[in-house]
Amino acid sequence: MRNSAPAMNLAQPLPFSFEPTGLPPEAERLRTDVRAFLQTELASLAPELKARSWSGFDPEFSKKLGAKGFIGMTWPKKYGGHERSALERYVVIEELLAAGAPVAAHWVADRQSGPLLLRFGTEEQRRLCLPGIAKGELYFAIGMSEPDSGSDLASVRTRATKTNEGWRVRGTKLWSSGAHRSQYMIALFRTGESADQRQLGLTQFLVDLSLPGIHVRPIDDLTGHRHFNEVVFDDAVVPDSAVIGSEGQGWAQVTAELAYERSGPERFLSSMILLKHLVEAAGPDPSERVAVALGRLTAHLQTLRALSISVATQLQRGANPALEAAIVKDLGALFEQEIPQIAHDLFGGEPALDAVDAMMRVQAYLTQISPAFSLRGGTREILRGIIARGLGLR
């Protein structure tokens, strides 16, 4: 059976760009300050807790980050920001994740909700939310995925209907990280109909999760922790002032938001604590087999980092590198997921959350949670569909 997929025209420039770039001197100088701060703050944090990192919820730590000026770094000062570069922010995020810092409380708000409000929100929305985010005191959840939809955002069915009171919302959002601890959610609702194009008729809303009719139900993951949530909207009424940007422009806005979510160092550093333990276990004179495996992982890590920094540079310039971000996310998830298996292949052992050996505890946690790495931020199938479409293959 002949393959009917269209062939790429290799004579044409590729539709994505990863321009080699480095970090500026001010970003590297900042790295020293961040490391010193983290060495003090994380000195007593157990290795298995460091392995959780971006799902580790610690409000006090987030407040300390805010006080140091490490949240809302690129935002205008009038909103509590610090007007630093995206690449300086990149260094902070990189150091936090490499050290295993618990960043879940402020994570979503700093990474994508705040930038989205800066770009599309009203002045009222910005002043309501941004200063609290920058202080590490205001937490956000993402309202995109829904039951039976996976990462197919165009299939959103949760409906917001215009009324005299505002918008009446019915439906369910799923896999909303941290929603049970968040004050706000930026949610994508269907506000119109389009028989031909599912992307039309979608609108983003700034939702106060304390409103009547909103029910947040935590979901236990394989490790027994509650990070994901189901959020049910049972005729909840949100005000007109909750609309972000323009009605019906939600699809364009949410795709811009996903570039922030998919391209950062969190997409390849989730298993970094285990990689550090592997290097320690290998010692100064590893076998050839171990040296080759660790060398391969290190090469992959450096390549992903270069791609990610390139995307960060594009974001700083105001571009929308959605395709490049999808590539980083897909490759990064593969990298993160293979490290627990490589650890087992190289050193064996019996990973267990209550093991005496720290590496076995870290390995046990990441073995159980790593399947989610290719789900969060867009499933592997959806991402590869985006990449294929960008390459003209579908």
Image: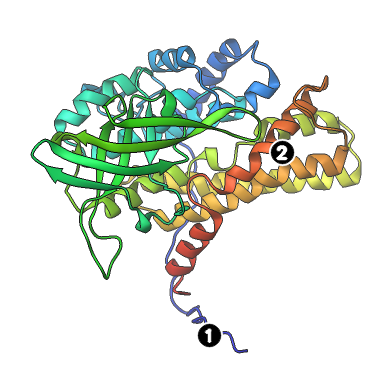
CA–CA distance between discs 2 and 1?
38 Å
Residue at image location 80% in from the left, 39% down from the top: 343
Q: Can residue 294 be seen in this view?
A: no
Give the answer, above or below, for where 346 lies relative to 328.
above
User: Residue 227 at x, y = what percent?
Assistant: 52, 30
> Could you tell me how many numbered marks the image carries?
2
In the rendered image, which residue does mark 1 sit on?
4
Q: Say what amino acid the circle numbered 1 marks.
A: Ser
Residue at image location 60% in from the left, 34% down from the top: 221
Task: Categorize mark 2 by other alpha carbons within 10 Å: few (<14), some (14-19), many (20+).
Answer: many
In this rendering, would 128 be left or right of 310?
left
Q: Can residue 215 be seen in this view?
A: yes
Q: Residue 295 carries which label?
A: none
Q: In the displayed image of the protein, which residue is found farthest to the left?
A: 164
* Element carrying mark 2: helix
Residue at image location 56% in from the left, 12% down from the top: 41
Residue 176 or residue 164, whichever sits in front: 164
Give the answer, above or below, for where 176 lies relative to 15.
above
Q: Say what amino acid the circle numbered 2 marks.
A: Thr
Image-quadrant location for residue 232? top left
Q: Which mark is residue 367?
A: 2
Q: Which of marks 2 and 1 is nearer the N terminus?
A: 1
User: Residue 129 at x, y = what percent?
Assistant: 26, 25
Tell me the quarter of the image containing the N terminus: bottom right
Give the answer, above or below, for where 88 lies relative to 164.
above
